[in-house]
Image (cartoon, rainbow, N blue to C red):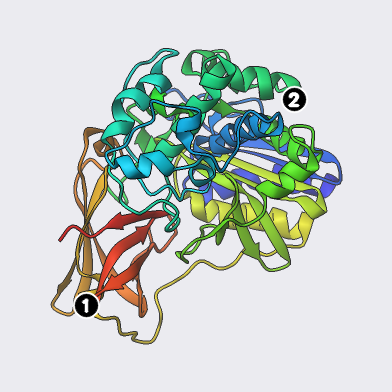
Amino acid sequence: MTNVQSWLDGNLADLITKHGVPAASVAVLADGEVSTAAAGVLNLNTGVEATVDSVFQIGSVTKLWTTTLIMQLVADGTVDLDRPVRDYLPEFKLADEEAAAVITPRQLLTHSSGFSGDAFTPTSRGDDAVELFVRDVIPGLAQEVPPGAGFSYNNAGFVVLGRIAEVLLGKPYHQLLRERIVVPLGLEQVATIPDEALLYRAALGHVAPTPGAPLQAAPVWSLVHAMAPAGSLLAMSARDLIAFGRGYLDATLLDRAAIDRLWEPQVDVPAIGGFAQHWGLGWMIFDVEGGRLYGHDGGTVGQSAFFRLVPEKGVAVALLTNGGDTPALYDELVGHLLRETAGVELPSRPEPPTDAVRIAPELVTGRYTGVLMQATVTLESGEFWVLDEAVSDEARVLLPEPRRTRLVPLDESRLIAAEPERGVYEVLAFRQPVDGRAEYLFRGGRLTPRRH
């Protein structure tokens, strides 16, 4: 274990500088021991340095905490994953009444419910934020894919799961996290709401106003409170995130049979590189050389988190960051740690092919519109382009101005960015062709329907 600690101590600062990351915190569980390291600056405006006790937002890694609450209810017989959500939330409504009547908790956990999931609509900053979101926002969300038809990442679905836990357990979501996970595991640096983050050295996210521009402090610390069960608020140290993972490796949060069910692939995911190949119950599942990884990624406004478990080796790795080329840092840093501690090799990310590849223009060109973003794919003078535009005020925090990206064919159903962003070439996959035209764009984990 000394080698892991000495490697972190000797390399973390250089790696975050190399990848333009203001600060990072890392924790590794291997051979029954935990190594931790931190480097960099938590806030470029204040110059406060990162320490191993600093808290970073974990973003959508929070979904594993929501999953834990639901599975605790399954374990005591309160929830059946295959009964309609309305058995637990009679008020659950969507724009599509037929879909709302049949969607199940299992479909919410596996992102296969099919309704629009990225409505980052503010409701309240209080304990009623989740309740109001389910009451006032969810009913207006369109059904983009039939329930159970395929994987499409859905933040709003996890808000519904969080509300199920609130109703059945009679307390606000943040209190449930503390009482049912934080306290039983003995975690020490965890902020379940922004007010609690003031008790710790808290990282601020950093964003580039335009691609390639210098990083700036993010204009807000967190996303809307209503999205807490999906990952808008929860922050902690890397050490405490590893302790959460240890709760799964040691089967202290749930029994072993329940955990094994969580890690069984439920749905397959289209290949876009750097993303899970399968989804279990709440958990991302990665097929890698030498084994299989379980975990989740998370992103908020300028903060990114990466969490991985290799159960058969007793290994867990957490990387928390606050801006910069975080995917490239993940590849190099987490890739090294997993190779050395668990003997697994992360796959290489896709890159533009060196030889020309043909793709049918009519398959891919068109306008694809979701709740947050609209993507228009065009063919201009023999070159493919995608124009990304925000379609809501919430989305403009992430994309203040429209952005055009040149694409090249990767294969007969996928396009890839001609230039990398944050060290990664983005892949766009086109799904379910009808009369030679793709019905959906799969990008960033979402199925976005063609509108034109």
Q: Residue at x 74, y 39 (%)?
A: 248
Give coordinates of residue 84: x percent, y percent: 48, 38
Instruction: Return the residue at label 1.
Output: 361
Marks 1 and 2, Cα distance to the nearest angstrom? 53 Å
- On screen, residue 26 versus residue 260, left or right, reads left
The residue under label 2 is which amino acid type? Leu
Q: Residue 227: image x %, image y %?
A: 42, 29
- Residue 413 shows in the view: yes
Q: Earlier in the sequence, mark 1 or mark 2?
A: 2
Residue 222 appears anywhere in the view: no
Mark 1: secondary structure: helix
In the rendered structure, the answer to whether residue 274 lies left or right of residue 338 reads left
Quarter of the C terminus within the rendering: bottom left
Q: Label 1: few (<14), some or many (≥20) within 10 Å? A: some
Q: Nearer the viewer, residue 143 or 445?
A: 143
In this rendering, position of residue 192 left or right of residue 372? right
Rendered image quadrant of residue 428: bottom left
Please state which of residues 257 and 343 is positioned toward the viewer in this rendering.
257
Residue at image coords 34%, 54%: 145
Q: Say which element carries label 2.
A: helix
**Amino acid carrying mark 1 in the image:** Pro
Q: Position of residue 178 (x, y in %)?
A: 63, 18
> How far from the left and from the top, in percent, is residue 143?
31, 47
User: Residue under circle 2?
Assistant: 185
Of 154 and 427, nearer the camera is 154
Q: In the rendered image of this protein, does residue 412 appear above or below residue 447?
A: below
Quarter of the image for residue 292 reads bottom right
What is the crowding at mark 2: few (fewer than 14 residues within 10 Å), some, or many (at least 20)? some
Residue at screen point 26% across, 34% down: 140
Residue at 38% from the left image edge and 49% from the top image edge: 114
